[in-house]
Amino acid sequence: MNYALQVENISKNYPTFSLNNVNISLPKGYIMGFIGPNGAGKSTTIGALLGLIHTDSGKCFIDGTEVSQLTKEEKSKIGVVLDDCCFPEVLTYPKVNKFMSKIYTNWDSEKFMNGCEKFGLSKKQPILKYSKGMKMKLSIISAMCHDAKLLIMDEATSGLDPIVREEILDMLLEFVQNEENSVFISSHIISDLEKICDYITFIKDGNIIFSAEKDMLKEDYGILRCSNNDFENIDKSCVVSYRQNSFSTDALVHKNMIKGDYVIDKVNIEDIMLYYVKGNKK
């Protein structure tokens, strides 16, 4: 299988935090969502992927090449979108076009100008006057217009209204339609990721909890609802975590392992993450 990116056993130790033997593989042509609570290690992992952080051990690869060995041309195939616009705010988007055409030899001016027009960006207004949603659209369009094959996005949709987020999700789905382009996106808005992602990777306290196909995760897990007495009789190897009150228990379980006639509800990805983070462990 060809991979757009691979993270192999990377570790990074800080005085108050450690990234521990992180492994991630994103096949070409797919979208992977990277989720986890604040301080879990998402930005550190992305920094290592981009070669911005020197890890203590392990390696990162983009399209089979170790990040430290990427040529300038290979780096140009990576589009990066962070949670803030990186262009000087005095520029208009036609000036951004001229600026970027001098940086990238493979810059597609026509694609960029058409994209800005399609998404309703003002030609005359400087970026300073743009809303946060308009700035993010500009950043994403720019990332796609230098023949990028991989988009790496860190909290790019945070703080945006639902309509703008929906437009951005559509842009990402269109980007991977050729089955060669790929997206690696971190976000706290799990419902957005569930709409578009093929794979989900969950990191907690610097450790990868799971990295799997979204549909397989939803097939594996379920929410079991039962009385406290019934819960005591359930094989706890099936239970990931649980929440309990005076009368009943809700538990995140590996539903195919449960024996007996119990009510097991379907889960979404946010349910799974919340139970891992907030649930009690047996």
Image (cartoon, helix red, strand yellow):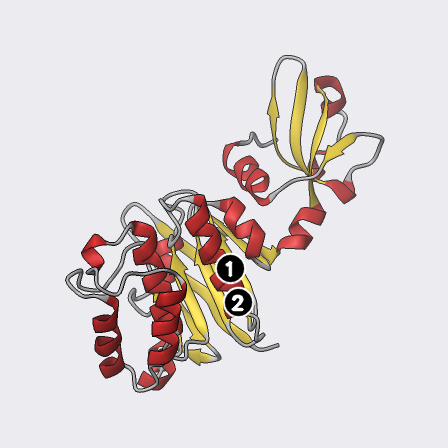
| Dot 2 and dot 1 residues touching (CB under 8 Å) | yes
Residue at (26% x, 75% y) in the render? 97
* Above/below status of 258 relative to 180: above
- The residue singled out by tag 2 in the image is 174
Coordinates of residue 142 in the picture (x, y in percent):
34, 70
Q: Residue furthest top?
A: 246
Q: Secondary structure at mark 2?
A: helix
Residue at (26% x, 81% y) in the render? 101
Q: Where, quadrant-wise, is the C terminus in this rendering?
A: top right
Coordinates of residue 227 in the picture (x, y in percent):
73, 19
> Image check: 205 left or right of 29?
left
* Above/below status of 274 relative to 56: above
Residue at (56% x, 57% y) in the render? 197
- The residue singled out by tag 1 in the image is 170
- Which of the pair 144/262 is nearer the observer? 144
Give the CA distance from mark 2 to mark 1. Answer: 6 Å
Q: Residue furthest left?
A: 90
Q: Give the number of the disc on residue 121.
A: none
Q: Is residue 14 visible?
A: yes
Q: Is residue 79 visible?
A: no
| Mark 1 nearby-residue class (10 Å; few <14, some 14–19, many ≥20) | few
